Image: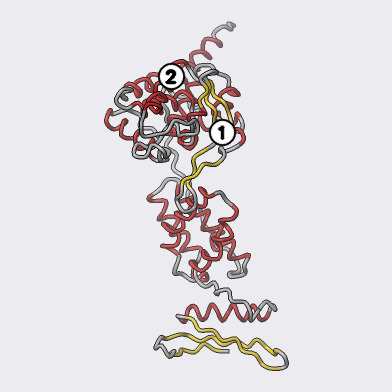
Amino acid sequence: MAIKKVKLKSGAVRYRVTVNAGLVAGKRKNIVRNVQSMQKARLLESKLKLDVANGLYDENDTTPPVQTFSDLYNQWWPIYVQTVEGSTAYKTKQLFHNHLIPMFGSKTLTAIKTGSIQSAVSQWRETTTKAYKERFIYLKKILSFAVKMQYIEKNPADGVELPRGVRSGKSPVYWDNKQVARFLTCIDPNNDPEKYTMFLLMVSTGIRREELCALNVSDVNFKTSTLSINKAYATGLNGKESIKGTKSTAGMRTIPLTPKVTIQLKKWIALLDTSKIISIRDDRPLFPSPQHFEKRLGINRPNKWLKDIIEANHLTPRITLHGLRKSFVTNMIRSGVDVSTVQRLAGHSTPDVTLRIYAGMNQSDAREGIDKLAEYMEQVTF
């Protein structure tokens, strides 16, 4: 059993691994493999010895040996991708190719130590507030796969101390009714009817971005003044856009529309009907792409529009599309609507989600609560 440096006929240099497989059909059998580096040769030699000792060696097995993190990813990925939706697979693939593979790809599995992972996490933490956790979770997941496949004995990520996220101490960011009204006045309904209709609908229904971009004209019922949420926009594994089901069964819902929203939707659909670019049919997108009316509005376009409006008009606080959803839910609760109703309208699975994530309390809420408590306590005299 040895590792020997050899030169192939092509002139390429390789490291030849020879391992005794024992007696096969009464004859001594040697396993011979050529690899590109001494480090890979040593790893392969160890694995072949272990396979032979455990009776796991199969001379007909043509599966490429797993030596580096990239090798591990190439074996793990086809298995993982069968367990998640296309949109999740797409995001995970981006995470590996943008962050994990550039950092660990060329490393052999035995060279990935707890210390190197700890350094990577600390480095990620300096540039992100949340993403570092997701990167670490997937790194630990794929190394757990390596343990199951017996490529390494234990997961080096198990000993990593994950830094705590920094708490800002600020209340959840949302707009109150006055701030929402100010925002809408920054959009001209005549010059930008699509933007105005879309954002009016978002602040009035709390609809998710993925649900908004998946809407069809047929999802609006003018007889009952309601909006049907029954699907969501998704990005597939190869970046291809598609339509899928809602985030959960609770996401399937029908939302009543205010008279103002109903009137604006009628105006907007009338503009679509009079357009010579798009055919009149109920399954057409409610919010089509400005460049291609037969296609849906891109999933990132609403966020860019919101950002541009906020910057051009110096609106504060600066919020995202999800912040508009928070504004809808928080303002509903502040106006006195019971939590279970808000939960159903927002498409949350439980009321706890509504309260825990969205029901932010601002300073005026806090002052009003303290004043009410003081008034109540003063009713008792001694």
Q: Relative to 379, is 71 above or below?
A: below
Q: Nearer the viewer, residue 165 or 341?
A: 341
Q: Relative to 173, is 341 above or below?
A: above
> Left or right of 151: which side holds 312?
left
Residue at the outermost right position: 26
Residue 169 % position (x, y):
43, 34
Q: For the residue marked with disc 2, what is the amino acid?
A: Ser
Q: Nearer the viewer, residue 78 or 102?
A: 78
Indicate the quadrant where residue 105 lies: bottom left
Residue 35 % position (x, y):
49, 81
Q: Relative to 72, is 2 above or below?
A: below
Secondary structure type for disc 2 = helix
Residue 98 % position (x, y):
41, 57
The residue tagged 2 is 364
Q: Mark 2, mark 1: which one is toward the viewer?
A: 1
Residue at the outermost bottom position: 27
> Left or right of 123: which side holds 67?
right
- Does label 2 or label 1 sit earlier along the sequence? 1
Confirm or deny contact between disc 2 and disc 1 (CB under 8 A).
Answer: no
Could you tell me which residue is drawn at 53 percent across and 77 percent down? Answer: 43
Could you tell me which residue is drawn at 50 percent across and 84 percent down? Answer: 34
Secondary structure type for disc 1 = loop
Binning the other alpha carbons within 10 Å of mark 2 as few (below 14), some (14 to 19) or many (20 upward) gives few
Q: For the residue marked with disc 1, what is the amino acid?
A: Asn
Q: Which mark is residue 207?
A: none
Residue 25 % position (x, y):
72, 90
Indicate the quadrant where residue 314 lies: top left
Binning the other alpha carbons within 10 Å of mark 1 as few (below 14), some (14 to 19) or many (20 upward) gives some
For the question of whether residue 333 can be seen, the reply is: no
The residue tagged 1 is 230
For the question of whether residue 282 can be seen, the reply is: yes
